[in-house]
Structures are given as C-alpha cells and as structure tokens.
Amino acid sequence: MTLHPARAVTSNQTGCHEQLEKVVRRHLNSRFRRPIAAHSAAAFAEAERWLSERDAPLLLDSYCGTGESTLNLARAHPDCAVIGVDKSAHRLDKHPGLFSDTPDNYLLLRADTDDFWRLALEAGWKPRRHTLFYPNPWPKSAQLQRRCHGSPLFPTLLALGGELELRSNWPIYVEEFARALQIAGHSAAAEPFQPQTPITAFERKYQAAGQALWRCRVQL
C-alpha cells in the first residue's frame, strides 16, 4: 500500500473553540432524534447476530477506515469480540486486499456512527473499550459541531461507557475532546504519545513525516 506524505493540520483556530462549553452543555441537556438510516439498522442487526454467537467482552472501533486498527485490536485482544464501524464502503472495501491470516474475533461494518452508537446504547451494549483513532478533525472553526465532542451524539458516546481513547495528530482536537469530557464531569487530559508499533496507516504516515501524535484516554 502506497503512503503519501502526511500533512500537518491547518486551522483558523489557535486553541480550544470559544463556543465549546456552550455547545457541549447544550448537547448534554438535549436528545438527538434524527431517524436511523436503513443501512445502519441493517449493520447493527448483523452485529447483534454476530455478538450473540460469542461470549466475549466487546471492543468497539469507531471510524475504523480500512479496518486495519480493528484487525490489530483483534490480534492484540484474542479474548475479545472487536467490531469496527465506518461510514465509507470505499474505505472498508480496501480491507480484504490488505491482510491475510486474519483472526475470527472481529467484524467490520458500514454504518453511520451517529446511528450505530444510539442503537448500541438502546440495546444495552457496554463495550470494555471504545477507540476513536484519527477521526476527521474538521479543522475549520465553523466545523466544531462536526467533531466528536461538538456533536449532538457526544452524550451517547459517553453513555456507552468503557475505556474511551481518542487519537489525533491535531493537538487542539484532543485538547477540546478532553475539555468536553471535563465539562461532562470526567477527569481527562490530552497527552503526546509515540506508538511503539503503528496500529493504523495514519500512524505510519505521521511517524514517517515526523509529526507528533496526541491522545486522550478516560475510563467512563
């Protein structure tokens, strides 16, 4: 797989968004009611069938892209059932050609996380771990509500619980995420980190480009 050089994130923000607390508090006190998309409902039904055949802790990998991170999580946690979710069929379709000798404890699904998280919460899912590795940072100031922590689905993400980890090469994104968690009553902080072994293509690109990586981890 050819990796193109990674570009640093550019933004008209120099720190956390000035409207972050207002937006987060509004979402914490409201309910998102958009109808569930049919393809997301079908994907969740498939996930429930798959999980029902396994007696194992759940690891959820949202925004999984090609599913490389999901595969690596499955290899690292053979005792767990790992589900990767991404909205892009194009990215997911790249997965079968990348890997061989894959374990049988993971599943990749095409679904909108906005829908999938709500369905998972309604079904009583309690993932042991939930990873958000390199979601689109939406770096323009006007795009705050497209970010995980600025979305109406942020309360749903928190309600799912488990060990939550977000990673990015844009420190402001991670700082905002940590601040949103603090607003919601959780102790959290952004921290730089260097992966010993890259878990995604993004990490390989950023490492090759000499970019610093950032993460936020919290036990909900």
Image (spheres, helix red, strand yellow):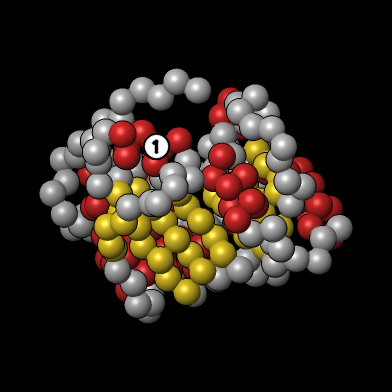
Residue at the left extreme, as displayed: 14
Residue 37 to residue 28: above or below: above
Asked which quadrant contains residue 82, the reply is bottom right
Q: Residue at x 30, y 45 (%)?
A: 169
Q: Residue at x 54, y 60 (%)?
A: 130
Q: Is residue 170 left or right of residue 113?
A: left
- Rate crowding at label 1 as few (under 14), some (14 to 19) or many (20 or more) other CA atoms within 10 Å: some
Q: Residue at x 65, y 69 (%)?
A: 126
The one nearer the camera, 83 or 21, is 83
The one nearer the camera, 209 or 189, is 209
Q: Residue type at mark 1: give it.
A: Arg
The one nearer the camera, 94 or 17, is 94
Q: How many marks?
A: 1
Q: Secondary structure at mark 1?
A: helix
Name the residue carrying label 1: 204
Residue 130 to residue 6: above or below: below
**Is residue 216 at all visible to an observer of this figure?**
yes
Q: Is residue 51 left or right of residue 137?
A: right
Q: Position of residue 131 (x, y in %)?
A: 51, 56
Q: Position of residue 76 (x, y in %)?
A: 60, 56
Q: Is residue 71 left or right of residue 140?
A: right
The one nearer the camera, 24 or 131, is 131
Q: Residue at x 56, y 39 (%)?
A: 68
**Is residue 35 at all visible to an observer of this figure?**
no
Q: Position of residue 16 (x, y in %)?
A: 20, 57
